[in-house]
Image: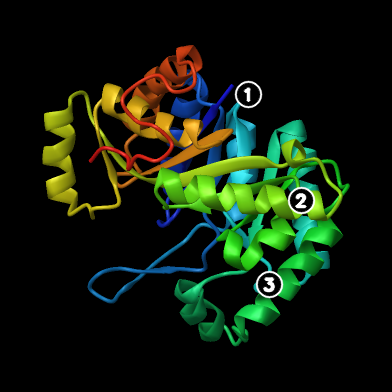
Amino acid sequence: MTRVGITLPSFREDPDIPIAVAVAADAAGLDGVFAYDHLFRVARDGTRRPALECTTLLAATAVETERVELGTLALRASLRPAATLAVALDTLQRIAGPRLVATIGAGDGESRQENESYGLGFGTLTGRVERLGATTAALAGRGYPVWVGGSARHVGAVAARADGWNRWGVDPATFATELASVRGLAVEAHRAPEAITPSWGGLVVLAATDRQAEEKAGRLDAGPDVLVGGVDRLVAGLGAYVDAGADWVIVGPLDSSDPENATRLGEVVSRLADRSPRDGDSGAGAAPPR
C-alpha cells in the first residue's frame, strides 16, 4: 500500500509552526512527516531565511506525535562526518523509536552557498557521491532504514545498496525510468530489487477545489512543476507515481505552514489506499495534472 508523507515548514525561527503541522498530519492519518536539511535558505529578494536543524526538529516532533514516521529529506553527507551523523540519528531513534527514516544525499548546486558560508568545502560531484557511499555504509544496520536521495544517474549505485531511494520533483515517466535503473543496479549488487523502498517527493498546492487551488497557486507564484488541485486531482496526480512504482509519495505544500494541508491530505491517503493500480486518469507515463 502506498504511503503518504508531508514536508514540514522548517525555514523559520518558531518551532511551534512545523510541530503544529506534524500534529495535524498525525491526526489526519498521514504516514510520515519529513524535515529538510538546510543551514539557511535564500529568499527571492536575496535575504537569508533561518532554518530549524533537521534532527533537532524531528526529535521535538517525535515527542508531540504518536504514530507518524519521522524522516529526514535529505541529510547531506557533505555537512557532517559520518560518525557525527550516526550519533545524531541514533539519538533521534532513542527518542522516536521505530518511526525514524533516515534519508541522506550528496547535495546539489543549491547546497554550495550553505557549505561555503560555514567554511565547508563543497567538492566535486564524484567526491560527494563517494562520501555519500561511505556514510551510507556507516549508517547501515543501526536499526532504522537508510534511504538515499538523488538522481539515479548520480547516486543509483549507492541507492542500490541502501534500504530506499528518494527522487524529488521529476515526472512519473522519469521516475519509472530511474527506478528501473536503481533496481537493475541492485540486481548487479546481488540484492533483491524489492528490498529497496522507492519514494517520490515534490511540491504541491492543495485546496478544497481545483479552482481554489489554482487561485492559490497564482498567489504563491507556483511554477509549472508544482502539482495543483483539489483532492481528486491530487489523487490522480500522485496515483501516476504509484503506477510508476513509488511506495511513498511525499508532498511539499508551497504554503507549508498551514496545517489544513495535512488535514486535506488525509483524504488523499484514504483515496490512494482504495485505489487499484492504473485506476484514475494518470498512468506511469503521464505528467501530473496542473
The kind of residue on which mark 3 rests is: Val
Q: Name the one closer to the observer, 229 or 89.
A: 229
Q: Report the Cα–Cα distance between label 2 and label 1.
A: 31 Å
* Disc sitting over residue 119 in the figure: none
Residue drawn where x is 19% and y is 50% of the image: 220
The kind of residue on which mark 2 rests is: Ala
Quarter in which the C terminus is drawn = top left
Query: From this viewpoint, is residue 44 visible?
Result: yes
Whole-percent x, y for residue 104 in the image: 66, 58
Q: Residues within 10 Å of mark 1 (few under 14, many from 20)?
A: some
- Seen in the picture, residue 233 relative to 16 is either above or below; the reply is above
- Seen in the picture, residue 129 relative to 161 is either above or below; the reply is below
* Disc sitting over residue 67 in the figure: 1
The kind of residue on which mark 1 rests is: Arg
Whole-percent x, y for residue 276 in the image: 48, 16
* Disc sitting over residue 129 in the figure: 3
Q: Secondary structure at mark 2?
A: helix
| Residue underneath mark 2 | 186
Q: Name the side, left or right, on which 219 lies relative to 258.
A: left
Pick whichever of labels 1 and 3 is earlier in the sequence.
1
Residue drawn where x is 75% and y is 62% of the image: 85
Query: From this viewpoint, is residue 147 visible?
Result: no
Quarter in which the N terminus is drawn = top right
Residue drawn where x is 30% and y is 52% of the image: 225
Q: Secondary structure at mark 1?
A: loop
Q: Report the Cα–Cα distance between label 2 and label 3.
A: 17 Å
Whole-percent x, y for residue 40 in the image: 45, 68
